[in-house]
Image (cartoon, helix red, strand yellow):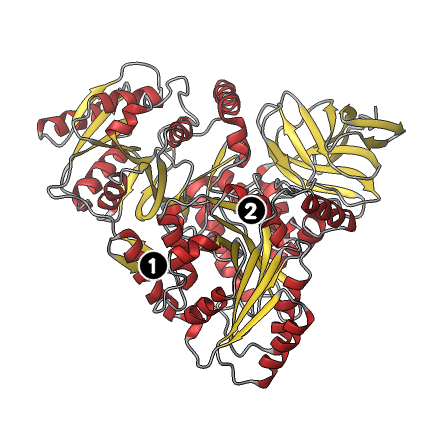
């Protein structure tokens, strides 16, 4: 074993070293020296284990960078990410459970490692706050105008959730500051080595029927350096089965013809047509299409670049799809990469909220021709329109979670400013109206859209199920704001009372019944959220049911009409809402699977008007799950899947329910157009007792056993994004697979 027990007093708090022993995937080379025998090496930490807020210092040196962030595994379940080592040491402040049974350290590195002492020191909440806030304040000293805004955010967090929530926000910000930049991530995980290139060429040579790609590139007045780089990015593809079909849309600059003529002469796979007059991008794309002889078309803008393995990666999916798209990032005039867009798998509702598919997009050439190519009159949205028409035909759509396309960010381009091509919005609105057959309007963000799904007349009855126990003040606010502000006319309220004892609450429940404002159903057993809601649904009269927490506050009159309209779509299962904390920050922006072990809430703590990750906090989309704090579903679907699983009494029952609805073939929808305030868990409190923590651990183990692989691969997320936090940060390491390995 290495590391010895050396108790000492630092600022009045006991500091101690844990004993570190290799557990699995590790070969001992000598005193403190190890070699990993698997991708991840696990070390057991023993001694007097820390709990609560803890300062950790680990002496660690390696000759190669770590392949992944170091992690603590607590009681065999959730992981706590640490930071990458600096100057031979990992320093971190972490929040551990109040009772820790086992603690392990996970490391991943290609080289041997030297592991020294592992020292821990418990911190008071006040000291933890000071330690976490200090670097945040220091980072703002160069921009003092930002300090008041930061202070207001921290004060709001303290007011909203007390010291515990303030500390959690400070911890999240500290981790964000410690994350490596995108350039480091690219160098570590996506830059191809010579061994990678050799393996890719061998994989291509082994293909039985390699598809041929016709890369369509409309050109107009492209700056010469960017035009040359775009063409060269195709010529240097590792995949050789391509042709580049270029249509110049009557450029006036002489360098354009010169560059295109030179390119055609230098490579027989490059074809060029010069249009006699300017017809705009849709007409130019169709001209490029006339040159195409390949099995597939791929779209490339005249100033953008492909990654060298782009066409190979598309080819690996070609036999299973009719349309394939990839992730993308931005490239500046100096070739620097930034702003990666890591997209979900095919997400129909997100695709009608904004053109998230973007680049790189490849479509079977026969399909493009059957649809008549690009529609003139949809300029600026011609790609979006084409994708929607392909999808409407029931196409098989696949997503490659690799950055294969570099979008040029220069002055005046759409990549740099969404407002640079405002005409695209009008074209997209027309395309979406044609695609959905519904009224469509522009969203609150540029290049985003809202479809107005209909509600039949007369509107169907929805039964709103509200579990409660005492807490009259919260329940009364929920009921009053619901009745006063909800515009949807056809609803009934079913309150499921779980052993209320407070006399004021009991009188209030009786008053509601006496005035026919609500029906009250009694659940006289220990709290079981799943059983309570199942009982409520059995007593519902409407063909649609809504599950509401008793600590909700209605602020938007159109919330219920939006959710009912979404739920009435035959392909839709569960519909979730955007929930805010009382201070106006986001509490629930949908559920992302795998975050924190099982699931987490997207965009948590961001301001209500924040764009979120590539506008996803402001647009309707398909998600794997939503919270049952505010959930609407057709009763027939609820009953078809058997309702909530009553073995999940408190945690994750809504995630499990949504996954079973999705498994039954329905799409779950989260909509920001239904927005409510949620006074989260005011009646239940936090999981602070040993009994509650053990129950939470059992329910987590249940979810991991039932849904484990799905939890690690949320189709509404991306394997290049982290499972350690709820902020769409980069995963370190990535979970993406490489088909040539």
Where does residue 625 sit, x and y in percent of width and height?
41, 35
Q: Residues within 10 Å of mark 1 (few under 14, many from 20)?
A: some
Q: Quadrant of the N terminus?
A: top right
Taking the view exactly as shown, the residue that stands out farthest to the right is 30
Q: Is residue 583 visible in the rendered structure shown here?
A: no
Would you say 193 lies left or right of 720 here?
right
Q: Nearer the viewer, residue 300 or 507?
A: 300
Mark 1 vs 2, N-terminal side: 2
Q: Nearer the viewer, residue 679 or 568?
A: 568
Q: Is residue 655 above or below residue 384?
A: above
**Tag on residue 400?**
2
Q: Nearer the viewer, residue 261 or 350?
A: 261
Of helix, strand and loop, which one carries label 1?
A: loop
Where does residue 297 sit, x and y in percent of width and height?
51, 57
Q: Is residue 688 above or below residue 725?
A: above
Q: In the picture, residue 99 is in which quadrant?
A: top right
Taking the view exactly as shown, the residue that stands out farthest to the left is 515
Between marks 1 and 2, how big is the CA–CA gap? Answer: 28 Å
Instruction: Report the residue marked by disc 1.
Output: 443
Q: Residues within 10 Å of mark 2 (few under 14, many from 20)?
A: many
Q: In the picture, residue 234 is in which quadrant?
A: bottom right
Q: Is residue 362 visible in the rendered structure shown here?
A: yes
Q: Quadrant of the C terminus?
A: top right
Q: Is residue 622 above or below residue 360?
A: above
Tell us which disc is closer to us: 1 or 2: 2
């Amino acid at each position: 074993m290495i590391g010895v027990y050396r108790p000492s007093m630092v600022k009045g708090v006991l500091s101690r070293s844990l004993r570190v022993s290799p557990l699995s995937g590790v070969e001992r080379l000598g005193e403190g020296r190890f070699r990993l025998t698997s991708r991840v090496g696990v070390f057991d930490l023993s001694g007097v284990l820390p709990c609560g807020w803890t300062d950790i210092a680990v002496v660690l040196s390696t000759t190669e960078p770590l392949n992944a962030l170091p992690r603590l595994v607590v009681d065999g379940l959730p992981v706590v990410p640490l930071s990458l080592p600096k100057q031979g040491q990992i320093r971190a402040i972490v929040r551990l459970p109040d009772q820790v049974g086992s603690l392990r350290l996970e490391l991943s590195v290609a080289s041997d490692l030297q592991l020294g002492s592992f020292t821990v020191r418990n911190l008071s909440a006040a000291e933890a706050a000071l330690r976490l806030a200090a670097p945040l304040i220091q980072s703002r000293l160069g921009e003092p105008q930002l300090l008041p805004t930061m202070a207001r955010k921290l004060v709001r967090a303290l007011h909203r959730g007390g010291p515990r929530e303030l500390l959690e926000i400070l911890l999240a910000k500290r981790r964000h500051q410690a994350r490596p930049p995108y350039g480091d991530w690219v160098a570590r995980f996506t830059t191809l080595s010579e061994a990678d290139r050799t393996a890719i060429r061998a994989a291509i040579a082994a293909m039985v029927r390699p598809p041929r790609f016709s890369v369509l590139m409309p050109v107009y007045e492209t700056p010469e350096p960017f035009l040359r780089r775009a063409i060269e990015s195709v010529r240097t593809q590792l995949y050789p089965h391509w042709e580049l079909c270029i249509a110049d849309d009557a450029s006036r600059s002489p360098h354009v013809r010169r560059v295109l003529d030179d390119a055609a002469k230098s490579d027989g796979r490059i074809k060029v047509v010069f249009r006699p007059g300017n017809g705009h991008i849709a007409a130019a794309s169709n001209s490029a299409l006339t040159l195409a002889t390949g099995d597939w078309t791929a779209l490339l803008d005249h100033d953008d670049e492909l990654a060298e393995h782009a066409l190979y990666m598309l080819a690996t999916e070609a036999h299973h799809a009719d349309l394939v798209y990839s992730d993308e990032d931005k490239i500046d005039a100096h070739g620097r990469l930034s702003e990666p867009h890591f997209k979900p798998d095919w997400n129909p509702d997100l695709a009608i909220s904004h053109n998230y598919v973007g680049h790189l997009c490849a479509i079977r050439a026969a399909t493009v021709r059957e649809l008549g190519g690009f529609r003139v009159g949809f300029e600026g949205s011609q790609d979006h329109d084409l994708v929607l028409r392909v999808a409407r035909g029931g196409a098989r759509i696949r997503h490659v979670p690799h950055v294969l396309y570099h979008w040029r960010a220069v002055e005046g381009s759409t990549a740099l400013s969404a407002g640079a091509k405002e005409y695209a919005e009008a074209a997209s609105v027309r395309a979406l109206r044609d695609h959905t057959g519904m009224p469509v309007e522009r969203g609150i963000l540029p290049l985003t859209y809202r479809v107005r799904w209909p509600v039949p007349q007369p509107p169907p009855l929805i039964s709103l199920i509200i579990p409660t126990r005492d807490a009259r003040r919260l329940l009364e606010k929920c009921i009053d704001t619901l009745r006063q502000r909800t515009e949807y006319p056809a609803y009934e309220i079913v309150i499921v009372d779980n052993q209320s004892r407070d006399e004021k609450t009991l009188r209030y429940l009786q008053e509601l019944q006496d005035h026919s404002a609500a029906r009250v159903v009694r659940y006289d057993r220990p709290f079981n959220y799943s059983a309570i809601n199942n009982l409520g649904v059995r007593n519902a009269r409407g063909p649609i049911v809504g599950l509401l927490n008793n600590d909700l506050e209605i602020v938007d009159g159109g919330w219920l009409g939006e959710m009912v309209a979404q739920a009435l779509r035959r392909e839709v299962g569960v519909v979730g809402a955007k929930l805010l904390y009382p201070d106006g920050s986001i509490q629930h922006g949908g559920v992302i699977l795998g975050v924190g072990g099982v699931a987490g809430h997207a965009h948590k703590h961001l301001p209500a008007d924040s764009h979120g990750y590539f506008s996803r906090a402001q647009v309707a989309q398909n998600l794997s799950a939503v919270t049952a704090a505010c959930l609407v579903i057709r009763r027939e679907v609820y009953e078809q899947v058997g309702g909530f699983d009553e073995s999940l009494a408190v945690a994750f029952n809504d995630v499990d329910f949504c996954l079973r609805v999705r498994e039954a073939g329905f799409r779950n929808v989260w909509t920001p157009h239904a927005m409510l305030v949620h006074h989260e868990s005011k009646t239940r409190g936090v999981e602070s007792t040993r009994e509650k923590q053990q129950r939470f651990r059992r329910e987590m183990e249940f979810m991991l056993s039932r849904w484990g692989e799905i939890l690690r691969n949320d189709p509404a997320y991306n394997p290049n994004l982290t499972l350690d936090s709820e902020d769409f940060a980069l995963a370190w390491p990535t979970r993406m697979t490489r088909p040539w390995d």
